[in-house]
Image (cartoon, rainbow, N blue to C red):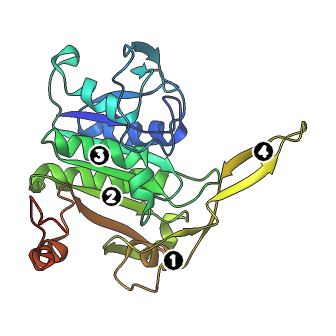
Amino acid sequence: MKILITNDDGIRAPGLMALRAALLPLGEVLTIAPERPRSACGHAITLHKPLRLMPVELPDGGRGFAINGFPADCIALGVSEHLGGRPDIIISGINLGPNLGVDMTYSGTVAAAREGAICGLPSFAISVASYEACDFRPAAEFAYNLARAVLERGLPPGAFLNVNVPPIPSSEIRGVMYTRQSRIRYSNRIERRTDPRGGSYYWLTGDRLDHGGQPDADGEAIEQNHISVTPVRLDLTDETLLADLPSWNLRWPDKVR
């Protein structure tokens, strides 16, 4: 069994090492990650400069590869013939910080799993819902169990999973919830500040707003100390709007007014 893992926290991130240790009993674990943190890079890929693949010794004594690109680049390289061909499964994480609601759009961790789905491979992203140093072992244990299930059952074409684990001891986790993406949003996204010379600069920030009390959503699951497993698909088509668009009576060429 060949397993490809990556993250957006960097090649030496403790979450990546916890994931690697948990998966080693399943087979060969190919570890490719950005040389430095790439949080919130979204689905960026490297097009306008060379990608460099650098062998590194990992903190656990194993071998991995660092690249000067993004998480999605790691997947593109990892499934290429240059590194032995296609893996059986792709796992991205373990991310420090939640990837709930619209966070999925910005997350490099989630983007790596999405890139895996684009490549036609079963993939999932996994995060711990805390920005503070935490115990990654519960998330790593769940990643192992989920990887076994995905390898056995597969995933539909164009689909992947996004997993969030509450930052609490295993004994306090109440179970697993199968969830939808919540409506979590942010306010006051751009904060204006002044530097010592009187110039203005801007800091991307914001407060997380309530997710709307969706009982079947990822944010609610974490608040209730459940592991959240959200199925995500590549097809972003809004079917309701698609059905309504013909009523707009758009024409080309339009009549002269």
Q: Can the viewer see residue 63?
A: no
Q: Quadrant of residue 71?
A: top left
| Image coords of residue 161 (percent x, y) | 27, 57
Q: Which mark is residue 200?
A: 4
Quadrant occupied by the C terminus: bottom left
N-terminal-most mark, 3 or 4: 3
| Disc with the residue nearer the chain's start (3 vs 1) | 3
| Dot 2 or dot 1, earlier in sequence | 2
Asked if marks 3 and 2 touch (Cβ < 8 Å), the reply is yes
With 14 as the anchor, is 122 left or right in this view? left
Circle 1 crowding by C-alpha within 10 Å: few under 14, some 14–19, many from 20: few
Type of amino acid at the residue the image marks with label 2: Asn
Label 4 neighbour load within 10 Å: few <14, some 14-19, many 20+: few
Count numbered badges in the picture.
4
Element class at badge 3: helix
For badge 3, the amino acid type reads Ala
Judge depth for marks 1 and 4 and give the one in front.
4
Q: Quadrant of the N terminus?
A: top left
Residue type, numbered disc 1 = Glu
Disc 3 to disc 2, C-alpha distance: 8 Å
Secondary structure, mark 4, is strand
Observer-side mark, 3 or 4, equals 4
Q: Which residue position is annotated with label 3?
A: 113
Which mark, residue 162?
Answer: 2
